Amino acid sequence: MFDSPHQFEPLVPQFRMEALRDRAAAVCRDAIALQGKAHPAVQSSLRELLRAMNSYYSNRIEGQSTSPLNIERALKNDFSAESHTARLQRLARAHIEAEREIEQRLDEGEIPLSTAFVCAAHRSLYERLPPEE
């Protein structure tokens, strides 16, 4: 498990930058081409699935992983009787709810690349959790 920043260095690729830029640009072009192509109901369903996936992987990276099944249960207010599992379920649920709120703020035109937005995003997550968590 990675637990020290030096294990991730260098964080910026040191070679083949042009090829990486070209690939990143292609992903952006493809994403723009797909934008708006799916029916709104499909887009909404995909957003919900992606929120759960984002929660799963983000929390897993942080060493706070719960299973997709337990995430789904948490979204239905079905929390485990085991305290550690229930804590992870609450974290996953808070993550998903915060992501919904952040998306709403973006839809309302807020600029995500600001200190205020980042602080609001963190507040949105942590205010959904008990202080001890």
Image (cartoon, helix red, strand yellow):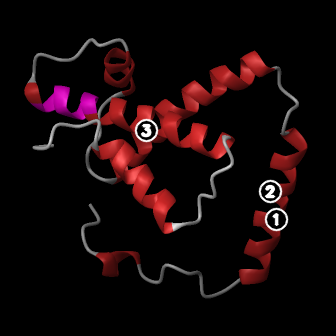
Q: Quadrant of residue 65?
A: top left
For the residues carrying marks 2 and 3, which lies nearer the camera in this image? 3
Give the residue drawn at x 55%, y 81%: 12
- What percent of the width, then of the height, locates residue 104? 59, 37
Instruction: State the CA–CA distance, disc 3 to disc 1.
Output: 29 Å
Q: What's the magenta region?
A: 84-90
Residue that mark 1 sits on: 25
Cβ–Cβ under 8 Å for marks 1 and 2:
yes
Q: Secondary structure at mark 2?
A: helix
Q: Secondary structure at mark 3?
A: helix
Marking on residue 120? none
- Quarter holding the C terminus is top left
Instruction: State the CA–CA distance, disc 1 to disc 2.
Output: 5 Å
- What percent of the width, then of the height, locates residue 4? 26, 74
Residue that mark 3 sits on: 98
Q: Amino acid at mark 2?
A: Cys
Residue that mark 2 sits on: 28
- What percent of the width, then of the height, locates residue 117? 50, 58
Left/right placement of residue 96 relative to residue 19 reads left
Cβ–Cβ under 8 Å for marks 2 and 3:
no
Q: Is residue 86 above or below residue 22?
A: above
Q: Secondary structure at mark 1?
A: helix
Residue closest to the eye, 7 or 131: 131
